[in-house]
Image (tube, grey):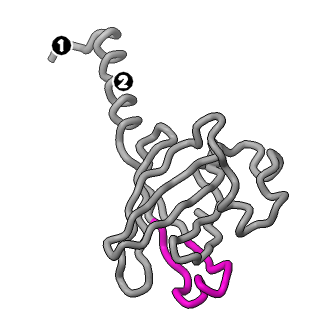
Amino acid sequence: MKPMTQSKMLTLATLALALAALAACEDMGKLYPANPQAEARGEMIAHFTSYGTDHGALEIVVAGGERLNGKYEPSPIGAPFGNVFKAVYGPYSVLPTAADKGTPTIASLTGTGGTTMQCEFYNDDYTNHGFGACQTSLGAAYRLSY
């Protein structure tokens, strides 16, 4: 068998790194009730699928079986960020010190039963974990941790 050249080894290593970067990563989080409307539904589980570019898919299964699906992405520069976050954590919670190494991130989800949910959270750029808030179209507010 012929030994592999340094050029071929470098090409294979580059290909392996590219494939690893493109592979989707799965993570789970929890939504904790933050108001009486949310208390009625209780805690919920969030399933994150990261595409490795600060973007990904988000699925939340609501008590009763309704599935909310959507996508998350960094909040565009100049776009309003913080209304949902402030509704749960208070008016001073969106200051830069709230998540000094996190990216402000937004998500919009739509449910199989017609419920919609908006989420705002800080995604830690080093650990890909974070915290935030979500609010449904029915007014239920949640603290998000993942």
Number of numbered discs overlaid on the protein picture: 2
Whole-number angstrom distance, CA of label 2 to CA of label 1: 18 Å
Residue shown at 15% from the left, 17% from the top: 1
Q: Earlier in the sequence, mark 2 or mark 1?
A: 1
Residue for point 47% across, 43% down: 55
Query: Is 1 within the magenta?
Result: no
Compared to residue 114, the image places residue 78 above or below, namely: above
In this view, 38 is above or below 110: below
Identify the residue under disc 2. 13
In the rendering, which numbered label is found on residue 2? 1
In percent of the image, x 29 and y 9: which residue is there? 5
Q: Nearer the viewer, residue 132 or 38?
A: 38
Q: Specify whether residue 45 is painted magenta.
A: yes
Kind of residue sitting beneath label 1: Lys
For the magenta stretch, what is the residue range?
Answer: 30-46
Residue count near mark 2 (Cα–Cα under 10 Å), binned few <14, some 14–19, many ≥20: few
Q: Residues within 10 Å of mark 1 (few under 14, many from 20)?
A: few
Q: Where does residue 119 sit, x and y in percent of width and height?
A: 56, 60
* Of labels 2 and 1, the one closer to you: 2
- Helix, strand or loop for disc 2: helix
70 and 32: which one is in front?
A: 70
Which of the 4 image quadrants contains residue 9? Answer: top left
Q: Nearer the viewer, residue 103 or 69?
A: 69
Whole-percent x, y for residue 124 in the image: 65, 48
Three-letter amino acid code at the position of disc 2: Ala
Residue 74's spot in the image, x, y percent? Answer: 56, 42
